[in-house]
Image: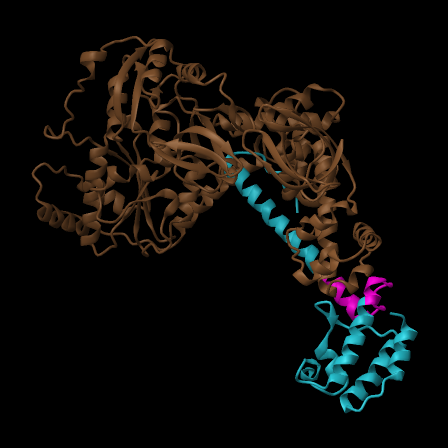
Chain colours: A brown, B cyan
Amino acid sequence: MKKYLIKRLIHRLDGISQITCVHSGNGRIASLRFRTDAFDFPLLAGRMYMLRTAARSHGVNLIAALECGLDISAWVTLIEHNFFLADIQLKPAAKRLLNSLDAAQRERLLASLVQNDLKPWQGVLPAPQCTLLGVAFQESQQRFQHVKGLMAWGLPQTRAEACYDTFGSDACAVPLARLKALLSFGTSQLIQSVLSSQTSLDASQRAALELLTWFRDQGSKGRTIFHKTELPKSSGKALELCTDRGWTIVDGEYCQLKSHAMLQVAVRRQLERLSSSFFPIYTPQEVQYSYSRYSQVIASYDHHNYQDEIIVAINSRLSVISARALPSVCEFTSQLSGTLQILYAPAPQLVVYSSSMLPIYDACTENVAVPFHQLPPDLAEYGTVIITDCHLLTLSDFLVALQGVPASTRVVLFDARPAMAEQPAHFLDVLKAYYPTIALHAASHPVSAIPAPNLELNGEDQVFNVHWAEQWHQASKGEIFVSDSPSLIATINQRLGRVRAPVVLQTQETSFRKHDLIRVRPAHANKWDPFICRIHSVRGKGLFVEAEGRYSTLSPEFVDEANVSLGFAMSPEAAVQAGARSVVLIAAKASRHAWIDYLKAYRIEVKQVYVHDQPMTAKTIPIFHQRLTPLVE
Amino acid sequence: MQKTLILDRLAQLNLKNRFALRLKEEMAKLIEVDAFMPMRKGSIDLTWLAARIGATRQIFYARRGNPEVHILLAMLNEFLESSIATLPGGAPLNIENSRLQTELTLIKQENSTLKQQLRSARHVLNMIHAGGIVLSDRP
């Protein structure tokens, strides 16, 4: 074993870490790699370790490490990098002076730094910088100790560092610290292993861990609120503990995770905000007058009469419109826009799900449409915001969209679920029960009817089996399969996912291999357009991916706040969300035409249709949440 | 250089320039009592020294001041450098100074606490949007 000072450390996204270190004796620089989760203590830049290395096929690997204290053998490197403290910048003159000192003096300065007694430094550095150096050095020592403590509980180094940076110095001090660290930064695998071992956590905390992860899993399926009798058995004590700490909320007989409650209450507050201020209402005559003027201006022979619907939409702050087909959405939007402008109201702002949908709604308004997370901050007072495809929004997306809407605005939500072959449950159902709801009768013009799909000639009733998927995949690598059966999606993803290729991306739960197709969605508060891409390789800077012929690098921070899943096969909604261009559809025989029309409306080319005979599982899993609509209006 | 040595050498100097004379007196006084001398870039703070002898720091620069002053300044710097190299217990305790140091330390610590709270708040926000678990303690 030889003593090294670590100069730089990079945790790559594929679970490999790379360090650059300086040999303390001869000053030689070595680059070593190791698995990020290989050690149970942190390797941090600016610290010295005894390292054992071995040459392997990918370069020199680090196979064993022992931590040891700093000594003056690496003095020059330490000075050059300001002791590896981020907010300390030594002056060049001070560095020169420090480097000119002899061994005994260096020894003394280093010892005084470690002991946090900075008197000897006062002749070397200006007094304020001396103080700052001491504080920063002690902070870095403390960080090391805490990260080490967290790693002893089983967290990998990256997660332990994130945990310390988030919770601060009480990350491993308070009595429930281990529970908090596991719940916030532990993988489900780690939580399982802690739950299965009897000794590591005391019984009450283990029950709380079990209950909270159960809540979270149910929440991902859409169930966020529970009657006390629905909870798993013998979780009464755990619920009490969690409620005492404020992690869950209990009201009467119902209980809920705090995070779910906060999101739902936030949406309700936003809706209350929208309904609290003055809102102008027009008489039916006024709207009729401007509508008839609009009709005369446009004078389109096939335009559909939406006058009654427009009166409702104009006179309600928030209305939900369910549309059977996208052309009628466009027609309605342009009529609404025209009528409003004749009433001297500002032109409505059209809001779409993602930028890939902008061309679909291009013709609807003269204003430029924007994705829901990019609402301009200067929306007009008493304006109108029309959000299309609300059925694609999650509750968190909806909150982000509402936050950008001024209080005096009229909001029109479009629900395109009637166009789908089956209608999944959605929070829009709750809004529909409270706000005025308009069902748009389809604008069934004979001229705009879509010609019968010619796919049926070559693909009629071909029953799908997984070999078709493999053949398609071999013929054209980027083909995406879309199915209404979750089990088929899982099967295709499992079959087409690489097995032997090297792992390129390791997320908390799964790993993805070279050339896998992945679907990337925003997971956190910061929203962007979801997309599908193929992963090529990983570097220190991030993940090198290709999406539709364009190459880019996804930074580790970006991947950290993304939800990544295999993207060979997905549901029709997911394909629309991610802006797929062309897909192969595998649908139940009865619903395949509806799905073809649905995908075509979003300008997704359906290259081939197969039918499957998978039993359809319970289609609409109901979702449970708090009241979202305003309590008082 | 030893304290006595430099004091001896100062006494032996035969100076004529008025600034040099004043500087010699001042230096003798400062070195005698081991007074704290502020440093800039590894040598004596010229502004501070000039103010103590009632001059501007121009007199310390080559081709501007008297050579006698330069000799004294070089001696003083040599003395200070050697005293740093031997690293005595640092400057004598200065109450004002240590008060400021404590304040700086506290502010620095508050700064890191606030940064950490900001990260923590961002984490809570992300957990709310991701349907995770919010573990903020009751206020």
B89 or A372: nearer the eye? B89
A364 or A3: nearer the eye? A3
Image quadrant for the N terminus of chain A? top right
Quarter of the view holding residue B83? bottom right
B104 magenta-colored: yes
Q: Is residue A54 above or below residue A379?
A: above
B97 magenta-colored: yes
A202 or A96: nearer the eye? A96
Quarter of the view holding residue A98? bottom right
In percent of width and height, residue A129 lies at: 71, 61
Residue at the (78%, 60%) spot, across then down:
A121
Q: Is residue A83 above or below residue A199?
A: below
In percent of width and height, residue A327 lies at: 20, 34
Quarter of the view holding residue A144? top right
Residue at the (39%, 32%) spot, across then down:
A546
Q: Is residue B115 above or below residue A123?
A: above
In percent of width and height, residue A331 lies at: 19, 39
Label count reads 0
In percent of width and height, residue A489 lies at: 40, 18
Residue at the (49%, 24%) spot, across then down:
A512
Residue A398 in the figure: left or right of residue A211? left
Q: Is residue B137 visible?
A: no
| Magenta stretch prevailing secondary structure | helix
Highlighted magenta segment, given as a residue range: B82-106
A202 or A159: nearer the eye? A159
Residue at the (74%, 70%) spot, across then down:
B43
Q: Is residue B57 visible?
A: yes
